Amino acid sequence: MGVDSDGRALGLGPVRHLHPDEAMFEEMLTGWRNQQLARNLAFSTIDAREKLVRRFVASINEYPWNWLAQHVDEFFGDLRAVSGLKQSSLRRYQGALRGFLGYLTDPAYGWERVCEELFGTHPSQVVVKPQKVV
């Protein structure tokens, strides 16, 4: 398992990890970081986005290939109702998570194929773009 410098999944390879879910998630984050660096994003932006994705995983206790829309709703609902997060921050967080899933579900990067091989399922885009309220 690994990623190239463009963030594409290289496949499973002959070596099996003791914790393939953790290893896959770390490779996904590495690939996403590479993709964002190639787009000339600031290191601080990339680090903040990665931190948010890690926070989401820790909160829902699931990896991206098992994420559901209800996980997203509960996580962001708690941030808004319990933590009092401002709407602008909430939108920025949702955009980061949507961007991560956009990367994972883009066929050019191959994560769907690798996850399907290893876990029998793959990530899907479960963070919808919010509608403007008029």
Image: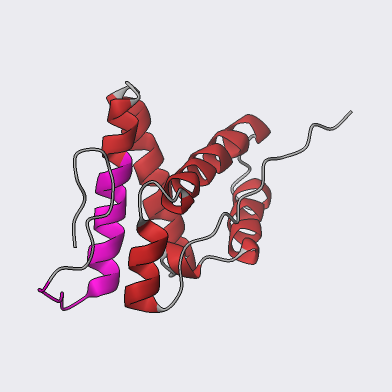
Position of 91 relative to 20 (above/below): above
Residue 58 seen anywhere in this rendered image of the structure: no
- Residue 36 location, x and y as percent? 34, 32
Position of 121 relative to 34 (above/below): below
- The residue at the point 48 percent across, 70 percent down is 66
- The residue at the point 30 percent across, 71 percent down is 21
**Left or right: where 58 falls relative to 37:** right
- Residue 2 location, x and y as percent? 18, 56
Relative depth, front residue between 110 and 25: 110
Q: Residue furthest front?
A: 108
Q: Main secondary structure of the magenta part?
A: helix
Position of 85 relative to 78 (above/below): above
- Residue 124 location, x and y as percent? 54, 59
**Left or right: where 117 falls relative to 83:** left
69 is within the stretch colored magenta? no
- The residue at the point 25 percent across, 56 percent down is 26
Q: Which residues are magenta?
A: 14-32
